[in-house]
Amino acid sequence: MVKDDLSALGITLGGELAEEAEAFDAEPDVFEVLPENWQAVETFQRCCRQWRFAGMGGAVGLDVQAVISVISLYQLPPEQQLERLDQVQLIERGALSVMNQPRN
């Protein structure tokens, strides 16, 4: 996993970093998505390369026009398009809160 990947590059972790790598490997990347949220998650995943960045400040959000373009591919009625945009923006806020956390 992480330690194996680093080891292949000739990097050895020690102390606290080694413990963090082990904890990272122990945590599963699996989480539950409620059926009513699946299409919003799918839309968000299709927008994964549409992040806007503010220089060295990190990500500031998704390109809204790109998200709207992806949503239009689903050919939803207008009211459902707005609902999907709201859902994607909720996911975006959660992602931003993790992406922009200070790193040690």
Image (cartoon, helix red, strand yellow):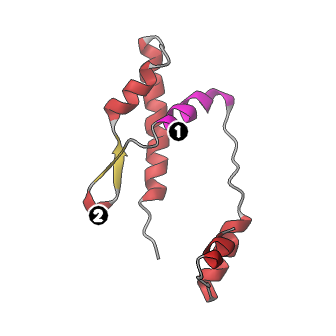
Residue linked to disc 2: 56
Determine the residue positioned at 58% across, 82% down: 11
- Secondary structure at badge 2 equals helix
Report x, y in % for residue 25: 70, 67
Residue type at the position of mark 2: Met
Report x, y in % for residue 94: 49, 48
Counting residues from the N terminus, which is met first, the one under dot 1 or under dot 2?
1
Which residues, given as a range, are shown in magenta?
Answer: 35-46
Determine the residue positioned at 33% across, 34% down: 64
Residue linked to disc 1: 45
Report x, y in % for residue 80: 48, 17
Determine the residue positioned at 51% across, 31% down: 43
Q: Is residue 103 visible?
A: yes
- The extreme top residue here reads 77
- The answer to which of 12 and 30 lies nearer the viewer is 12
Determine the residue positioned at 38% across, 26% down: 68
Residue type at the position of mark 1: Gln
- The answer to which of 21 and 38 lies nearer the viewer is 21
**In magenta stretch: residue 24:** no
63 above or below 28? Answer: above
Report x, y in % for residue 22: 70, 74
Q: Is residue 90 left or right of residue 42?
A: left
